[in-house]
Amino acid sequence: MTSRVFRVHPELLDDLREAIDHYRSQGDFTLPERFVAAYAEAVTHIEEHPLTGREYLPGYRRQVAIPFPYLLAYAVDDESVCVAALLHANRNPDANARILRSRD
């Protein structure tokens, strides 16, 4: 098994904060905690099995933060895995593509 360097784009933390703030505003105090757990599980899955994510947009794979409608978009090559963005799955794909292009 090849060991890859695992990186997270700095703007991903902004994406995460935005999603957590959204769930905080919903009135169910357990939602943010459950979302963070789903996010962490998705990140762990990417780190351990980077090639199992579905192809998403050119150059990117995706891993869904089940059961939430968010996905982690990431790039993988022989040497590294870079999680580029946390995206709402229902957002217009063109908008998600623009976000990813801005993080290349």
Image (cartoon, helix red, strand yellow):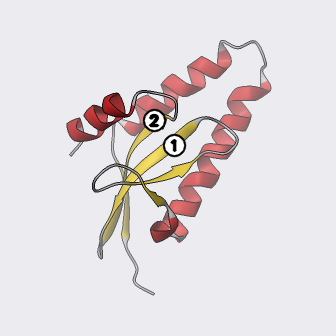
Disc 1 target residue: 71
Tell me if residue 36 comes above or below residue 80 in the rendering.
above
Tell me if residue 76 comes above or below residue 96 in the rendering.
below
- Res. 11 image quadrant: top left
Image spot of residue 22 (x, y percent): 59, 18
- Res. 38 image quadrant: top right
Name which residue type carries label 1.
Leu
Image spot of residue 56 (x, y percent): 40, 51
Label 2: state its secondary structure: strand
Disc 2 target residue: 87
Q: Specify whether 74 is left or right of 90.
A: left
Tell me if residue 72 comes above or below residue 53 in the rendering.
above
- The residue depicted at 66 percent of the width and 18 percent of the height is 24
Image spot of residue 90 (x, y percent): 52, 29
> Tags 2 and 1 in contact by the CB under 8 Å rule?
yes
- The residue depicted at 58 percent of the width and 53 percent of the height is 42
Label 1: state its secondary structure: strand
Q: Specify whether 57 is left or right of 41.
A: left
Image spot of residue 4 (x, y percent): 37, 73
Name which residue type carries label 2.
Leu
Badge number at residue 56: none
- The residue depicted at 70 percent of the width and 14 percent of the height is 26
- The residue depicted at 58 percent of the width and 62 percent of the height is 45
> Callout 2: 10 Å neighbours few (<14), some, many (20+)?
many
Q: Specify whether 23 is left or right of 52.
A: right
Q: Quadrant of the N terminus?
A: bottom left
- Res. 28 image quadrant: top right
Q: N-terminal of the two: label 2 or label 1?
A: 1
